[in-house]
Image (tube, rainbow, N blue to C red):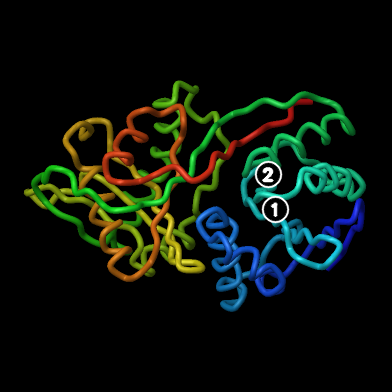
Amino acid sequence: MSAVSTAGLRLRFCTDPGEFLAVADDYLSADPVVSTVVTTVAHRLLSQRAEGISQPDRNWWLVVSDSSGVVVGAGMRTAPYAPHPPFLLPMPDEASVALAHALHEREEEVLAVNGALPAVELCAAELTRLGGGRVDITQHTRLHELGELTMPPPVPGGLTVATEDDVELVTDWFAAFMDDADEQAGRPRGTRAHEMPDRADMVRRLHAGRLWFWVDDAGEPVHLTGANPPSFGVARVGPVYTPPTQRGRGWASNAVAEVSRRIQAEGTRVCLFTDQANPTSNKIYAALGYRPVVDMANLVIRR
């Protein structure tokens, strides 16, 4: 672990997700919905480490503490896809600026930053001041939590757990989900850098039983919904994908509703992200009872 102190704040960089979770536990558990991305990734990589799966040396976890030692911010840089954007949770404005300086001094090339506003904007702006370039927003996202679930009008078929035998179809639909989400939001396909699980990771997800098909009354898969394992009592739904020829039939609403119902029945809170540029998905989730929690953004630095 390395540390940087500035303006009454201490920035600690951890290389061990277990150490990070131990140090930042109170901060992360105080608002587990907002911290969902960081905590689910930390727990997943911690589990993989226990299985002997190594992590890239570039990975780090950030803990921001104030002068009294209280954790007031957190983040990570673990994205396996280029340009490996850091993901930031809420933190004091001066911590966002201090982080940019720390990364610059560490000679880390940072060409994208994702996460909570305004932390990502302040960090990216300072990075460009130090290293040049300009900041562009590639995606505005919004995190929602489910309140009281409102079930949609029923449709034929039902939910079934995807298995390892479905790995090829699930992999194809994961990839299509990313590209179609760009297109539906009015962006060129492939605009966003994103994580695409490799086959081994996809098989692990299938073994965990957290990917479901909605099958029609003929037993054919027409939709895919996934969810992360719970972390600090919160599970995040996604991806949510319906092939173009099957859209507009209520598959997504019913699948997300049923997955959400099952998660809540386990005593777990449920959340999901939407792309603010996609009015269709935002309308669907609002109708089910999902309510906005926080806005986030994905930024790129162009040099």
225 lies above or below 207: above
Distance from disc 1 to disc 2, alpha carbons, whole Å, reads 6 Å
Pick whichever, 30 or 190, lies toward us.
30
Left or right? Give the position of 22 relative to 183.
right
Residue 215 in the image: x percent, y percent? 16, 50
Q: Which residue is mark 1?
A: 77
Pick whichever, 40 or 294, lies toward us.
294
Left or right? Give the position of 42 relative to 247.
right
Q: Secondary structure at mark 2?
A: loop
Q: Secondary structure at mark 1?
A: strand
Q: Which residue is mark 2?
A: 85
Quadrant containing the N terminus in the rendered view: bottom right
The residue that appears at 74% across and 36% down in the rendered structure is 111
Residue type indicated by callout 1: Arg
The earlier-in-sequence mark between 1 and 2 is: 1
The residue that appears at 11% across and 51% down in the rendered structure is 157
Quadrant containing the C terminus in the rendered view: top right
Residue type indicated by callout 2: Pro
The residue that appears at 42% across and 33% down in the rendered structure is 181
Q: Seen from this angle, which residue lies furthest front?
A: 68
Q: Quadrant of residue 125?
A: top right
Q: Quadrant of residue 93?
A: top right
Instruction: Categorize mark 2 by other alpha carbons within 10 Å: few (<14), some (14-19), many (20+).
Output: many
Residue 82 in the image: x percent, y percent? 66, 42
Left or right? Give the position of 196 relative to 151.
right
- Mark 1 vs 2: CB contact within 8 A: yes
Number of on-image labels: 2
Residue 261 in the image: x percent, y percent? 26, 59
248 lies above or below 91: above
Residue 104 in the image: x percent, y percent? 88, 43
